Amino acid sequence: MYRTLIFLLLMVLWVIFSGQFDAFHLGLGVLSAGFVTWISSDCWFEDRQRGLGARLTEAWAMAGYTLWLSWQVVVANFHVLYLSLHPRSLELLKPRVVLFKTTLKSDFAKYVFANSITLTPGTVTIMIMDDQFLVHAISRKTAEALPGEMEARVAAAFDNHHKEEAG
């Protein structure tokens, strides 16, 4: 039942975004939605026993985090623009590699955090080793912000909802 719901959701999104209703495009939609469902349906909502209220809470947390992250990307773009256009940009650009330990527990939360870092201009996640993150930062300001508020927001939005599978 779960995979069927995922497939139907992806198929509806395909139809909405493609706007094409001919057999060729609908066939591509079925193949694409089926393939994505097959490879990724276990990534979301690992605990299938949770109720609708818990699911809505997760969706709300994800939406809130996505909005916050979008704003951080805008702010970081302006910081990189400032660094690029500043008359003393060579003095301000102090690239460095930062190693820090995360408090995040679940693999999913670490995944979201690593990708959020990389999406934010001026930082790139190089490697994750257990609880250690290795991140390249373009300036002292961006390096000092790590792990910071982003990690706390990822923990609040995702670490409470996704538990690591016992290995």
Image (spheres, rainbow, N blue to C red):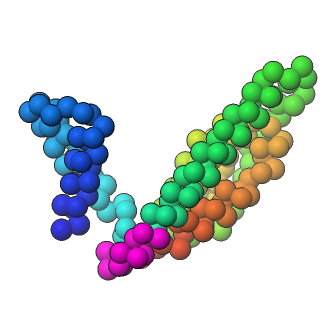
**Horizontal side, residue 133 vs residue 14: left or right:** right
Q: Quadrant of residue 43?
A: bottom left
Q: From what the image shows, is residue 6 above or below residue 73?
A: below
Which x, y percent locates residue 22? 11, 31
Q: Which quadrant, please, contains the N terminus?
A: bottom left
Task: Answer whether residue 63 is magenta in the image.
Answer: no
**Horizontal side, residue 142 vs residue 33: left or right:** right
Whether residue 2 is visible here, answered yes or no, is yes
Task: Answer whether residue 55 is magenta in the image.
Answer: yes
In the rendered structure, which segment of residues is drawn in magenta? 47-57
Which x, y percent locates residue 28? 17, 36
Which x, y percent locates residue 105? 56, 70
- Residue drawn at x 47%, y 71% is 57
- Residue drawn at x 89%, y 19% is 87
Which x, y percent locates residue 135? 67, 46
Whether residue 164 is visible here, answered yes or no, is no
Q: From what the image shows, is residue 31 above or below residue 146?
A: above
Q: Quadrant of residue 72?
A: top right
Is 73 in front, or is 40? Answer: 73
Q: From what the image shows, is residue 141 above or below residue 6?
A: above
**Horizontal side, residue 77 vs residue 21: left or right:** right
- Residue drawn at x 69%, y 34% is 77
